[in-house]
Image: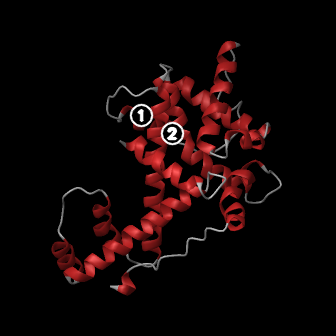
Amino acid sequence: MHDDQPEPTPSPRDSAWFETTHWSVVTSACNLDDPLAREALERLCQTYWQPLYVFVRRQGRSAADAEDLVQGFFAKFIEKNYVAGIDAEKGRFRSFLLLMFKRYAANEWDHGQRERRGGGRSIISWDQQDTEQRYLLEPVDHLSPERAYDHQWALTVLDQVLKQLGAEFRSSGKQGIFKEFKVFLSGEKGSTYAEVGARLGLSEGAVKVGVHRFRQRYRELLREEIANTVKAPGTVDDELRDLLAALG
């Protein structure tokens, strides 16, 4: 089973390593001279587009208003280099972004001004219909717009981590193993180790070891994803606790 799983990668805790490897995803997103800026920006937008959209919709705004505000905000985010002021928000991009978005939205509505989809500027490719359908498919609850934002952020992060893990398995031709193992992440009752082993041609013990490594790698990727948007290594654990709380 050892050959069927990706080996765990080191998780350096050195602050200098952290600053250059993770926080740069945020800081480079607004540095238009950086060739990786577009990639970094899309990564952030993909994580926070749906949470911000949900936030606006939970305020009672229409789907069209939500689309306009979020796209317009991301356009302004780049132009005004909002990220330069993040130190004042203790280096949590999630909290910083919502604060800046609230200010932007309040200004737009106070003055009766709305930028249609970022003023015609293409910020990131996105599926308008899928965005609204995802919102409508969410269970009915009484979460505040802020809590709904955090909840959607948590779901989006977990989805991105699972996709990244799936890509690792596909790259090594082990998508079948990924499909069988991912059900063990949810904690819901399903196939037993023995049943999975029978389908994969592995012993029950080998499946147990493989699932353990699978979960370990998932946790590593989750920490890395969280680390992309917090400034200090010690903040990762706090943000992970917030993520779990948002799912509760």
Looking at the image, tell me whether mark 2 or mark 1 is earlier in sequence order: 2
Circle 2 is placed at which residue position?
Answer: 50
Q: Between 142 and 196, which is closer to the camera in this rendering?
A: 142
Q: CA distance from mark 2 to mark 1?
A: 8 Å
User: Dividing the image into 4 quarters, which one contains the N terminus?
Assistant: bottom left
Tag 2 near tag 1, CB within 8 Å? yes
Circle 1 is placed at which residue position?
Answer: 135
Q: Is residue 86 left or right of residue 199?
A: right
Binning the other alpha carbons within 10 Å of mark 1 as few (below 14), some (14 to 19) or many (20 upward) gives some
Say which residue appears at 79% left-offset and 51% top-offset. Answer: 31
Callout 1 amino acid: Tyr
Q: Is residue 116 left or right of residue 54?
A: right
User: What x and y, as percent, mark residue 102?
Assistant: 62, 26
| Secondary element type, mark 1 | helix
Inspect this view and state whether residue 6 appears: yes
Say which residue appears at 47% left-offset and 59% top-offset. Answer: 161
User: Dividing the image into 4 quarters, which one contains the C terminus?
Assistant: top left
Callout 2 amino acid: Gln
Q: Is residue 209 above or below residue 219?
A: below
Q: Is residue 193 above or below residue 154?
A: below
